[in-house]
Image (spheres, rainbow, N blue to C red):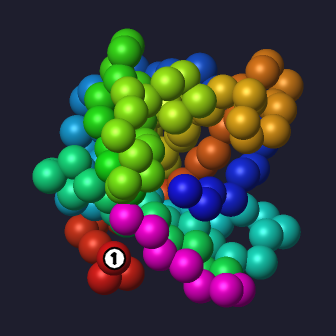
């Protein structure tokens, strides 16, 4: 799955922040849009209740991809290719938090470049429904 990566300092969770499964539940049937400053395009992810999701990269070239998502160990969001028949591993999963409409995803730096704490942090905005018709 193609995601724009923007390394950010991790922010501590506030009392109004959802984390793990409650945050992931709030993403279902909605869209996360990531616009990284200095990057040429936006990336989006729309999670469906059936365990599939559609990722979108505005490109160029413009690209959409259907993937599978699941809940991983410790309340992580795991994403693998739609045709992959494997159990998601650590590099397929991200910690998720949601504060108001700001979604923060923390991925292992193993496959995604390296942040200051060995994690890559992506931030995006949660928008209701499927405004991009993914």
Name, please, the residue furthest toward the left.
50
Q: Residue at x 24, y 68 (%)?
A: 129
Is residue 65 in the magenta section?
yes
Residue 111, horizontal then vertical, whole percent? 72, 36
Q: Residue at x 35, y 40 (%)?
A: 85
Q: Find disc 1 in the rendering and name its residue.
A: 134
Residue 82, horizontal then vertical, whole percent? 36, 55
Is residue 11 in the magenta section?
no
Range drawn in magenta: 60-66
**What secondary structure is marked by label 1?**
loop
Residue 47, horizontal then vertical, whole percent? 30, 55
**Disc 1 crowd, CA 10 A, few/some/many (<14, 14-19, 20+):** some
Q: Residue at x 79, y 19 (%)?
A: 117
Say if 80 sits above or below 74 in the image.
below
The answer to whether one can see residue 88 in this image is yes
In the rendered structure, the answer to whether residue 130 lies left or right of residue 110 reads left
């Amino acid at each position: 799955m193609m995601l724009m990566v923007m390394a950010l300092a991790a922010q501590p969770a506030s009392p109004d922040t959802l984390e793990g499964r409650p945050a992931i539940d709030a993403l279902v049937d909605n869209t996360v849009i990531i616009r990284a400053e200095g990057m040429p395009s936006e990336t989006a992810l729309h999670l469906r209740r059936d365990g599939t999701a559609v990722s979108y990269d505005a490109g160029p070239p413009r690209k959409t991809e259907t993937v599978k998502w699941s809940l991983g160990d410790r309340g992580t969001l795991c994403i693998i290719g739609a045709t992959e028949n494997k159990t998601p591993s650590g590099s397929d999963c991200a910690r998720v938090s949601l504060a108001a409409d700001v979604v923060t995803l923390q991925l292992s730096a193993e496959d995604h470049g390296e942040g200051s704490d060995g994690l890559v942090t992506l931030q995006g905005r949660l928008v209701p429904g499927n405004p991009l018709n993914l």
